Every structure is written in structure tokens, then in C-alpha cells.
Amino acid sequence: VQLVESGGGLVQAGGSLRLSCAASGIIFSIHAMGWYRQAPGKQRELVAAITSGGITNYADSVKGRFTISRDNAKNTVYLQMNSAKPEDTAVYYCNAAKWVGALRYDYWGQGTQVTVSS
């Protein structure tokens, strides 16, 4: 299983970035996909998630600014980041999750750095 993130980098406050995560080795369409982030000295937190059926969920801190989407034909999930803030600076990780009964199986990408300058 591979989840490969791309699109991170440096952006000025108020700017935009688009993160991509290409998945291989899984049946992409049945997995819920998510973006998490971890800032220095902080715990990893959920940023946005999208179910296999396309239902989305966002952290309060990014609602109205970030949009998660998925393209099952390309096995790719995206995170469109608009109106970026310095507090969005973190390593962003792609996650794929599926449930077998009550058991959750998670796969993670290696992370991509996003830095928002003020």
C-alpha cells in the first residue's frame, strides 16, 4: 500500500495550495480518505475527511477555507487550501481507512510540509 502526497510548499498568508494524495495497493473506492496535520510540539489532528460515499467532515478551524475531494477513477484525494493562515503550518498526512466489522485499518502517507508565512 502506498499513499504519496504532493503539493506542499511555502505560501503566503491568504494564499492557496492544493495537496494531492495518490493511492495504490488498495481498493480506493471503499476507503474513507482523510487529511491530518501535525505541527511541531502538537498532536496529529484531523483536518478533513471524505467517506467512500462522498460525505465530508472538516475541523472547525478550516471550515469554509479548505475543501476535500476525491477522484475514484484516479485513486486520488485532494485538499484545496484557500485563505491560508500561519497556524495552518504543519506536516500534512494523507490517510486511508476502512472498517472490517468493528476493526479499523489505517494507512498513512509520508507527509508533506506546508508552511504559511505571515
Image (cartoon, rainbow, N blue to C red):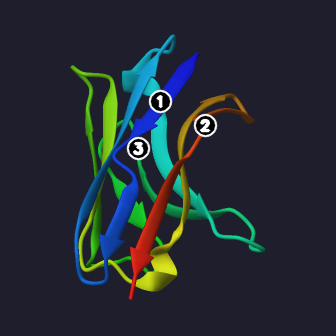
At mark 1, the secondary structure is strand
Q: Are marks 3 and 2 in contact (CB under 8 Å)?
A: no
Please provide percent x and percent y for residue 116. 41, 75
Mark 2 and mark 1 residues within 8 Å of each other at the beta carbon: yes
Q: Secondary structure at mark 3?
A: loop
Q: Is residue 54 left or right of residue 118?
A: left
- The residue beneath circle 3 is 51
Q: Residue at x 22, y 75 (%)?
A: 15
Give the image location of residue 48, x and y in percent.
44, 60
User: In this orientation, which residue lies closer to the viewer: 30 or 95?
Assistant: 95
Find disc 1 in the rendering and name its residue. Answer: 4
Describe the element under mark 2 as helix, strand or loop: loop
**In which image quadrant can residue 86 be found?**
bottom left
Q: Amino acid at mark 1?
A: Val
**Tag 2 residue:** 110
Q: Earlier in the sequence, mark 2 or mark 1?
A: 1
Residue at 46% across, 41% down:
33
Tell me residue 31's x, y (percent).
Answer: 47, 30
